[in-house]
Image (cartoon, helix red, strand yellow):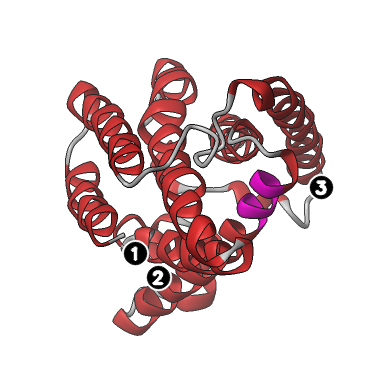
Amino acid sequence: MALVVAVLVTANVLLHQWTGALRLATAVAVGVLLLAVLRWAGGTLADAGLARGTLARGAVWGLALTGLVGVVYALGALLPATRPLFEDRRYDAMTGGDVLTRVLLVVPVGTVLVEEIAFRGVLYGLVCRARGAVWATAVSSVLFGLWHVLPSLHLASAKPVLTSVLGGSVLGSVLAVVGAVLFTALSGVLLCELRRRSGSLLAPMGLHWAVNALGYVVGFQLR
């Protein structure tokens, strides 16, 4: 566990600073390294939610959840009351090619792959073997929330809906970070439960990709 946390702390800093091919290569390397740590600790692919017999079931869950997110996002984009939630100033300088790259490469490899292997795969598997699913969910979700401290540092200024509520002060930025950590920790609980119920890492992977990637698509279309 100590080694996994050390790898994640280092990876969090590097992935936050690096972009492009270097970031993607780092994400893949971190995922492989974490799986190697799990194996060294006596774990198996089944502990990581990657057992061959569960992949088909996980894929079905993932596809179904992707469709559900697509419907929810479409409705949210159409309704005036929820449309501002998708607005983000970071989309202003993006092109269609940028969005496509994020949807097909950055999100699935640089975000979903490394985060799901880390939090719902290796961390969850290690803790679950020692303490059970409840402890595994708690530890994984808390660390998943803390993982998002760096990415949320400028969230208050990037999201107009947050800027209007929190303003541009230091306190507003701190509240945005705290809110992001709490929200992602709760999201981690949901993703862990999907992992437990489906028995496969593909289920939370599908939901994670859909939330992030389709969010880029909708936000870009509404800019």
Amino acid type for the residue under numbered disc 3: Leu
* 86 on left or right of 77: left
Disc 1 and disc 2: Cα gap in Å? 6 Å
Picture quadrant of residue 186: bottom right
Residue nearer the viewer, 195 or 115: 195
| Proximity of marks 2 and 3: CB atoms separated by less than 8 Å | no
Quadrant (top left, top right, bottom left, bottom right) of the C terminus: top right
Q: Earlier in the sequence, mark 1 or mark 2?
A: 1
Q: Vertical placement of 60 versus 48: above or below?
A: above
Name the residue beneath numbered marker 3.
79
- At label 1, counting other C-alpha atoms closer than 10 Å, the crowd grade (few under 14, some 14-19, many 20 or more) is some
* Distance Cα–Cα, label 1 vs label 3: 30 Å
> What residue span does the magenta drawing correspond to?
190-196
Residue 126 pos. (x, y %): 44, 53
Residue 165: image location, x then y, percent: 54, 75
Residue 13 among magenta residues:
no
The vertical placement of 24 against 100, above or below, is below
* Secondary structure under the numbered disc 3 in the rendered image: loop
**Residue depicted at 48% across the width and 32% down the height:** 45
